[in-house]
Image (cartoon, helix red, strand yellow):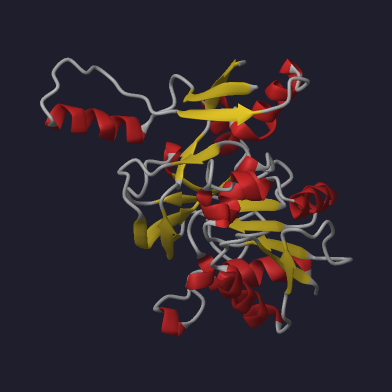
Amino acid sequence: MKTRIYVTLKSGVLDPQGKAIQHALDGLGFAGVEGVRQGKLIEIDHADNVSDDDLDQMCRKLLANTVIENYRIERG
Amino acid sequence: MKTAVLVFPASNCDRDLAVAIRDVTGTDPVMVWHRETELPDGVDLVAIPGGFSYGDYLRSGAMAARSPVMQAVAKAAERGVPVLGVCNGFQVLTEAGLLPGALMRNAGLDFVCRTVALEVGNSQSLFTSRYAAGETIGIPVAHHDGNYVADEDTLDRLEGEGRVAFRYAEQVNGSARDIAGIVNASGNVLGLMPHPERAMERAHGNVDGRRLFEGLLEAVA
């Protein structure tokens, strides 16, 4: 079973890398880009009996830093 | 005096920190590998070095903060043992929840490697007693992820409680409120991005870091 975990910066946390990507897109001539935020996608292969709570704990204990990041679990 | 320096895979300032401690105490610190579950008995100071533990995988300091030795460090910190985290050590301490906030990519995206001007925010702490409050000192920085971030309430609390030990006196990395180093609520845990162990002797070109170790080691002796 494969679960996808999306880790994104909380709104209000500045994202210098996203800003740089936006500038690069501007430089390539793409018009109309109003903002870029960079996050992470983590794919986990796991046994069927791994619970939703286990996945949530994985996010809280390691995969996301909840001081600055949010996470979303998309169970496979 | 018993001191310990933690060593993680890809720590690279552990020896510098050990030399600085030995220089001031006259005794070698115990180098403690990250897989250890206990610190030396009766340890008086734990130092967490700079470097790129675990290659900065996931987030700087994230993996190191979950290594076995950090459980022992958390317990020691709880007992009041002084803990000093320099650069990656500061990142590890925030990731471990022993200090608030987080350290993100520098605002300019560049790796910053130079001596910067710091203002001593508080000279009452264990770590800053040999400095004068408001004094400007020069300490080298070398980091990519030193941009301190915390919510406004946390920042207000840190400032209100005099827990900002060092501030940048110039633009370095975009840190909130120019924060370069903070202490925990009990005052026994300091995390700072600049490297005081690289400013210990004339040959380094600068000795402004030395007083941090002298004050700290005097306090715990």
Residue B152 location in percent, x, y? 51, 26
In this orientation, does residue B195 appear? yes
In the image shown, does B197 or A66 lie closer to the viewer?
A66
Residue B199 horizontal side relative to residue B213, left or right: left
In this orientation, does residue A67 appear? no
**Up-down: is B30 above or below B103?**
below
Numbered disc total: 0
Residue B84 location in percent, x, y? 65, 58
Residue at point 47%, 75% (across, down): B207
In the image shown, does B216 or B76 lie closer to the viewer?
B76
Residue B49 location in percent, x, y? 60, 62
Residue at point 60%, 60% (across, down): B128
Residue A67 horizontal side relative to residue B108, left or right: right
Q: Quadrant of the N terminus of chain B?
A: bottom right
Query: Which residue of the protein is positioned furthest toward the right in this rendering?
Result: B41
Q: Quadrant of residue B143?
A: bottom left
Residue B56 horizontal side relative to residue A18, left or right: right
In the image shown, does B202 or B198 lie closer to the viewer?
B198
Residue at point 56%, 23% (across, down): A5
Q: Quadrant of residue A58?
A: top right
Q: Quadrant of the C terminus of chain B?
A: bottom right
Residue B41 location in percent, x, y? 89, 66
In the image shown, does B54 or B24 lie closer to the viewer?
B54
Residue at point 57%, 63% (across, down): B11
**Up-down: is B200 above or below B144?**
below
